[in-house]
Image: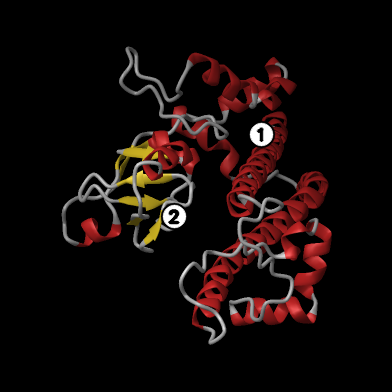
Amino acid sequence: MKSRTLQNTLNDHSKQPTETVYCICRRPDTGKWMIGCDGCDDWFHGECVQLRPADEDLVDQYFCPNCQSKGFGITTWKRKCRLPSCHSPAAVASNPPSKYCSPEHGLEFFRSQQYLTEYGTKELAAVLSAVNDANGFRNLGNSVSVPRSAAERVKLEDSLHQDEEKLAPMKIAIKRQKARLGARSQFISMAKERQKRVADELRGEADQSSKGIKEICGFDIRLAMDDDEFADWCEGEEGRTVFSCGEIGGREGLCMRRKCEKHKYWLRIAMEDIELEERLVNEGATMVLTEENGQRQRQDVKSLMESQRLK
C-alpha cells in the first residue's frame, strides 16, 4: 500500500507539461490525499473510494474497485489500536503481542475506564461473585440485572434515566454537528462541480474563444458562512432547492476570477476543515458512548449489590 499528498503532486507537476488523470473519477491530482492500488498501480482520491487519511496506517494492502471486481485481490486491514481515538495499528507482532500500538495507549485506555474506581472492595466483590468466568465479567455492561423487588426496580430505572438525561444534550449536539457537517461536505462537492460546469460553459459561449480560457476560481460566497448562518440557509427555500436538485444552478455568488489570490486553494482548505471537524465530532461521539456504557455498568454494579444484599 502506498499513498501521497500535495507535496508529491507539486513535484510531479513541475516535471510534466500536462495533467495526468487518476482514480475512478478520471480527474487530476487536486492535492488531496491519495492511495495507490497494489493491483493496477493507479492512484485514487481517498474521498472517491471512501478512505480517510487517518486510516492510512491501518491499510495493509489496497485493491481498487476495478481490481477487486476482476479478482486480483481484496483490501486487507491491520488490527487497530484498542484506544478509540488512535488510528495506528496494534502491535500484534511484538513479543508479547498487544492490542495497543504502544504501552502508553494501553495505559490511556484503562485510564478512560476510571469509573470502575468509584467502587470499593465490597462493591467489586459483589460484581465478581455474580459472574462465573472472564467472559461473564466482560458482558456485565451489556444489560442491567433486574432487582428483586418492584420498588428497587423503579429506583434503579429512575437513576438510569437521570444519567441518560445528563447525556441527552450532548447526544443532540453531536447529531446536529454531524448533520451540518454532512450538508457542508455535500455543498463543497456541488461547488466543485459548478466550478467545472461554468468553466465549460464559458469555453462554449459564442463571444468567448476557447483558446486561453483557464479554470475560474469557483469559490461560492456561502462557503464563508459560519455554522449557524449556513444551517439557516440550508433550511431556507434556496437551500432546500439546491440540495433537492443536487446541484448549484446559475452563477450567483460565484467568483469568476482567474488566478484569484483572495480565494486561492479554497477547495483544499475547505476539505481539510471538513476532515478536521469530522475527527473532532467522532472523538466527541466516542466520549459520549464511553460515558453511556460507563453509566450502564455503574447501574449494573448497583443492581448486583442489591441482589447480593438480599441473599
Q: Residue furthest top?
A: 95
Dividing the picture into quadrants, the one containing residue 195 is bottom right
From the viewer's perspective, tell me whether residue 121 is left or right of residue 164.
Answer: left
Dividing the picture into quadrants, the one containing residue 84 is top right
Between 296 and 256, which is closer to the camera in this rendering? Answer: 256
Where residue 183 sits: x, y (%)?
Answer: 66, 64
- The numbered mark at residue 291 is none
Is 216 situated above or below 42? below
Camera-side mark, 2 or 1: 2
Quadrant the N terminus occupies: top left
Where residue 272 sits: x, y (%)?
Answer: 60, 46
Colour basis:
secondary structure
Amino acid at circle 1: Leu
Where residue 233 sits: x, y (%)?
Answer: 79, 71
Q: Residue furthest left?
A: 71
Quadrant the C terminus occupies: top right
Q: Earlier in the sequence, mark 2 or mark 1?
A: 2
Q: Which residue is mark 1?
A: 304
Q: How many marks?
A: 2
From the viewer's perspective, tell me whether residue 296 is left or right of residue 137.
Answer: right
Between 269 and 302, which is closer to the camera in this rendering? Answer: 269
Amino acid at circle 2: Gln
Disc 2 on helix, strand or loop?
A: loop
Q: Which residue is mark 2?
A: 50
Q: What residue lies at 70% left-to-right and 30% top-to-bottom?
A: 305
Q: What residue lies at 66% left-to-right and 81% top-to-bottom?
A: 250
Q: CA distance from mark 2 to mark 1?
A: 44 Å
Is 69 situated above or below 72? below
From the viewer's perspective, tell me whether residue 16 is left or right of residue 229.
Answer: left
Q: What residue lies at 35% left-to-right and 63% top-to-bottom?
A: 26
Disc 1 on helix, strand or loop?
A: helix
Where residue 196 sits: x, y (%)?
Answer: 52, 69
